[in-house]
Amino acid sequence: MANVNIDWDNLTFSYQPVSKRYVANYKDGKWGKGGLTEDATITLNECAGILQYCQEVFEGLKAYKTKDGRVVTFRPDLNAQRMYDSAQRLEMPPVPKEMFLEAVDQVVVANKDWIPPYESGGSLYLRPYLFATGPVIGVKPSDEYQFRLFATPVGSYFKNGIKPITICVSDFDRAAPHGTGHIKAGLNYAMSLHAYITAHTNGFDENMFLDPATRTYVEETGGANFLFVTKDNTIVTPKSDSILPSITRRSLMHIAEDLGYKVEQRPVKLAELKDFAECGLCGTAAVICPVGKVVDHGKEIAFPSGMSEMGPVLTKLYETLRGIQLGTVEAPAGWIREIK
């Protein structure tokens, strides 16, 4: 048993080290056997590929305690596949899906005492990541890599209730046309940080990035996909080759169809925003974060759902997905991986 002394009711969404993490190394053209370690420190050569040319991809998922006391993860097979695809795009050796799932299981089992109780609304956040460790001075892929997965307990994203946010249309581009916007690489997030800080400095909670080619279509924020609801309750999500394929978004669209809603994935023009009834951002951390207002260079676009609470359609989707994760709603086949 780990020596865990945490005030679960006041747990924030921030990093704190837990007992063990998983490590595996790629060398001489093959993956070595991975395993658990208590050491949270990484030692790197000064010329490591991650430091010189940013070869790194990562994922994010959670482990939960359900109402009936089980420990589960939500669709980790999709995280494994997305990380596999991301690695291939950056010319890195993909982590075998079996190794990825083994790492998830081992880290969760080894850190079960760090999983927040069901009543707290918290979870054990899992961060798998792959990066280049071999020395590289010329511009080329590294020959050596490391895959790691650590965990950290996090509190409910909405500690003070679910309140809609205000976002701005960004002057910056999140990704280049035909670039890396569709993969989960650290370099994409680094590119969004200046835009994020600029938005905060100007009083906004987040950015709305437009397509980099024409700047007329909605793409995503720095770390979440968009969901829109029309006035006749059709659920719309933007379609673009430079949008990250969010697992949360894909799950919500599936749930929406099961609930009888009409669902569309298509290009969404910025000019259409005034016609939508609800807007939300979706991702692992919050599931859905409602947007009450978008500001386009001084022009305010206020959604009828308002600034006081999440709209009714997005609320239904949010409650259903959270119920699936926490075991109070029956999950579609294969969505929940129980860890014993």
Image (tube, rainbow, N blue to C red):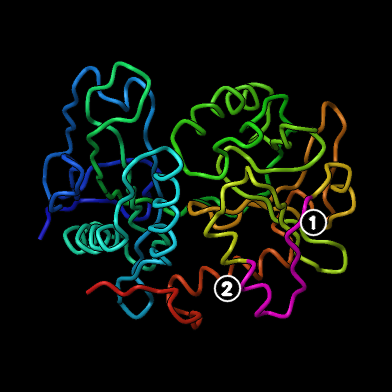
Of residues 99 and 299, the one drawn nearer to the viewer in this rendering: 99
Q: Is residue 320 left or right of residue 57?
A: right
Magenta segment includes 259: yes
Residue carrying label 1: 305
Q: Is residue 146 left or right of residue 50?
A: left
Instruction: Report the quarter where the C terminus lies.
Output: bottom left
Q: Amino acid at mark 1?
A: Ser
Residue 1 in the image: x percent, y percent? 10, 61
Residue 51 in the image: x percent, y percent? 32, 22
> Based on the displayed image, in which of its 4 quarters is residue 263 positioned?
bottom right
Q: Which residues are magenta?
A: 253-267
- Label 2 or label 1, whichever lies nearer to me, is 2
Residue contact between numbered discs 2 and 1, judged by CB atoms under 8 Å = no
> Based on the displayed image, in which of its 4 quarters is residue 53 positioned?
top left
Q: Amino acid at mark 2?
A: Thr
- Above or below residue 51? Residue 18 is below
**N-terminal label among 2 and 1:** 1
Residue 38 in the image: x percent, y percent? 11, 45
State how far apart marks 2 and 1 are (Cα): 19 Å
Give the residue displayed 45% in from the left and 74% down from the top. Answer: 335
SS state under label 1: loop
Label at residue 98: none
SS state under label 2: helix
Residue 323 in the image: x percent, y percent? 50, 74
- Above or below residue 259? Residue 161 is above
Give the residue displayed 73% in from the left and 33% down from the top. Answer: 168
Residue carrying label 2: 320
